[in-house]
Amino acid sequence: MKDRVSLSVSEFHHLSPAATRWAWRLAAAGAGGLLLSFGASFVARDGFSRFLQAYLVNFCFCLSISLGALFFVVLQHLTRAGWSVAVRRLAEVLAAAIPFWAVLFVPILLLVLVGGGSLYPWNDAAHVEHDPLLQAKTPYLNAPFFAVRAVLYFAVWALVARFYWRHSVAQDETGDKSHSVRMQQWAGVSIIGFAVTVTFAAFDWLMSLDPHWFSTIYGVYFFGGCVVGAFAALAVIAVVLQKAGYLQDSITADHYHDLGKFLFGFVFFWGYIAFSQYMLIWYANLPEETGWYLARQSNGWTVVSLLLLFGHFLVPFCGLMSRRAKRNKAVLAAWGGWLLVMHWIDLYWLATPTPANGPSFGIIDVLCLVGMLSLYAAVLLRIAADRGLLPQRDPWLAESLAFRNA
Amino acid sequence: MGQHVNSQTEAESKLVGLLAEFSTPEAVVSAAEQVREEGYRRIDAFTPFPVHGLDEVLAIRPTILPWLALGAGLTGVVAALAGQWWTNTIDYPFVVSGKPLFSLPANIPVTFEVIILFSAFTAFFGMLVLNGLPRLSQPIFRSERFRRATSDRFFLLVEASDARFAVEKTRSFLQTVGAVNVEELHDDAAPAQLPKWIGWTLVTLAIVALIPPLWIARARVVTSDQPRWHTFIDMDYQPKFKPQTASALFADGRADRLPVPGTVARGQLRDDERLYRGIDPDAEPPPPEPKKPDPKTPEAGKPAPQPASPEPAVAWVKDFPIAITDEAMKRGRQRYNIYCAPCHGLAGEGDGLVAKRAQELQQGTWVPPTSLHSEAVRQQPVGQLFHAITNGVRKMPAYGPQISAPDRWAIVLYVRALQRTQNAKPEDVPPETLKAMEP
């Protein structure tokens, strides 16, 4: 019985140059996919609004994984967790992609500033003119304030993500423990800033798609999805990296076990929040609130809603309950992949339904999804390329490598 | 002397096993491995902190507690759903804001709480039971050296009940696998008992706890001249408005609010004039009839009732706005026998039990109920009969608030049938029956 308290020298902690060369190919494929999707929008009927919706859904999907990863990183420092050091760098890489998402948000921002309401009805002056409710909401829902808020959200996230990234990689060089102390000191403030900005970002970017409707728990619901997405992505990425020969000895069944526990917990958290929102609206039965669910229970959306109930909550809840499922790489990665798909459907379900349309998934959506994911992968590879995949001189690394679930 | 007594008790008390002491975690793990290999099965280890690998070496089976907790959780699901289903649909069916009596979303919070309750209790008490707790007397704690098991020593216990156990052989074997000390463990000759005062305190508390429910039970059956004692005064005097009361909150001084102009309460839209008022809105009202003496003479000895204040001519409905079915007729008879027959009589002669009793009492103010077979009543259109039931006539009170509109129409239908029985012509009788009646 050997306690693994030091890094094995034979292990690969750095991406090979071949892997980083892929970054450029993926970037090209991603940009191509997005451009093709945009091009297809000119051909298809109703193409432009469908492209915008697909862009928003896929943008939110990718961003939400980075946000969930940022939450994970900050949480580890807030709680001074030792076990997670072996997988923390992967989350740091995901979070460090946030400035890139700020760039991809620029098209949405410009669209809103131009006006016309092709994405957000409150942004259409002609529509608001005949809508007293929207007129009353104008002090909050107006283009300039929307832009200011979006800049603020990205500023907070990028600041926090870069702060934790900078200190973590700097520690790789120096091994200075003061980096850990600094990261812990700022964790409390960071997580409060994260909570506020994520809540309002969800209100602004997704909830205001249906500007008459409102739900105060919406931000928490979005946050729950973010964290589920991040843990699912972490599990999948860790397994893929180990398959490719990286971090063979660092990440053990015990780390997967804890990632699985988090995933299990947040699957339930998501279900709990989703039901809390649903039950109050169902019980009160007020027309101003039920309309949102009505749109999600008609025109074929019922199937998607039930798919979420079972696929995003009940089935993975049962599947992840067992200790064996969480400790088995293949099983955990399969649930991770499944929940990533469900998280995407969740965002699609939040953004797309209107009383008039049914669920549809066409070439525009496929190209947009593939493009966005390829760009995401390219960015992650670029960020990770010249840095290790492990915080090699973190003072808790030894504890993490020796970590065992009792 | 003391030594003698001690050894005698030890000889009498049962041997539990041999306790081997080790100074490092590695030593206890390797010793446990060898003890297992030697064939011992009933062994246990005690360490100051979790030693990784020890569980595997001791081949400790995973606990069944998670399964028990899962079973309790599932029991909670069934119990909570069944309980809510029974109370909401069988025991006390009560419609809340138009929702089904049993609807899942409303029942999930309670179900969730019951799952937590059942599985948490099962986990907690199951842990105690599976560990054999509470245990007041544990021989291992009689060992002085064992106290170091919580700081810096590691212990391995080989139980005497093991098939391969033999005191001397096992002792020397434990010494060969690296034990720094091996001692015999004996059962406590006088096992610790629960102190008596704890039992008495519990009994006393149980009796004291019975006082409040007994006091409440007594208060429910005896009367008192003292003002009522309010346990929860906010529940007895709730800060809410009751119907038809005054309130200083609103400008008009009433607690009741009028409906918002232009709105109608659910189920109160009575815009079908024919069904709800018995009036045909499309027909022209007939010309007012010239006043003439009532052709019908009332009962002898009574003054003729004053003709009602001249009502404006109304276009009464002449045919039924409900479907004329056997079902409606039966419903009408049943309602008639409940609401009308006490005064008007089962056959509509105006000879109900109330009317008979009133006449016996000879009270001057009694106006006898009209016979439904009088010409005046027979000539009335159905709409007018309906109107009479709804709003009352002269001394007869209004029955509109008590009987639903379709039921009132069913009564009118039955009254029409009654009238026909009393004024039947031969053509009304089916031919076969008529033939049978012929002499």
Image (tube, rainbow, N blue to C red):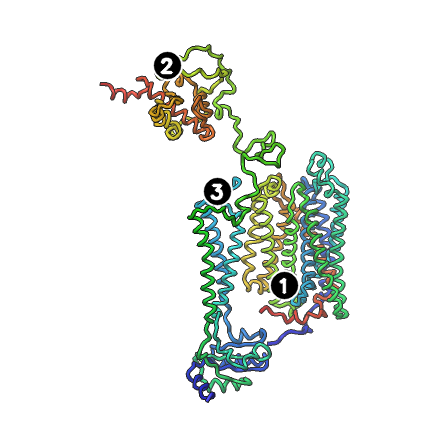
Side of B49 relative to A176 (left or right) = left
Give the amino acid type for the residue marked by disc 1 in the picture. Answer: Val
- The mark that comes first in sequence, 3 or 2, is 3
Side of B14 relative to A320 (left or right) = left
Mark 3 neighbour class, 10 Å CA radius: few under 14, some 14 to 19, many 20 or more: some
Is residue A300 in view? no
The chain letter under disc 1 is: A
Name the residue tied to disc 2: B297
Position of residue A34 measured from the top left corner of the image (x, y, whole percent): 71, 49
Checking the image for residue A239, the label placed there is 1
In the displayed structure, would residue A204 be above or below residue A250? Answer: above
Q: Residue furthest front?
A: B225
Give the amino acid type for the residue marked by disc 2 in the picture. Answer: Thr
The chain letter under disc 3 is: B
Name the residue tied to disc 3: B94
In the displayed structure, would residue B294 be above or below residue B234? Answer: above
Question: Which of labels 3 and 1 is toward the front?
Answer: 3
In-front residue for pair B254/A132: B254
Do the dots labelled 3 and 1 sit on one chain?
Answer: no
Q: Quadrant of the C terminus of chain B?
A: top left
Residue at 50% x, 48% y is B229
Position of residue A354 measured from the top left corner of the image (x, y, whole percent): 63, 41
Position of residue A253 measured from the top left corner of the image (x, y, whole percent): 60, 67
Would you identify the image quadrant in which residue A81 lies? bottom right
Mark 1 neighbour class, 10 Å CA radius: few under 14, some 14 to 19, many 20 or more: many
In the displayed structure, would residue B289 be above or below residue B410? Answer: above
Give the amino acid type for the residue marked by disc 3 in the picture. Answer: Phe
Side of A275 relative to B323 (left or right) = right
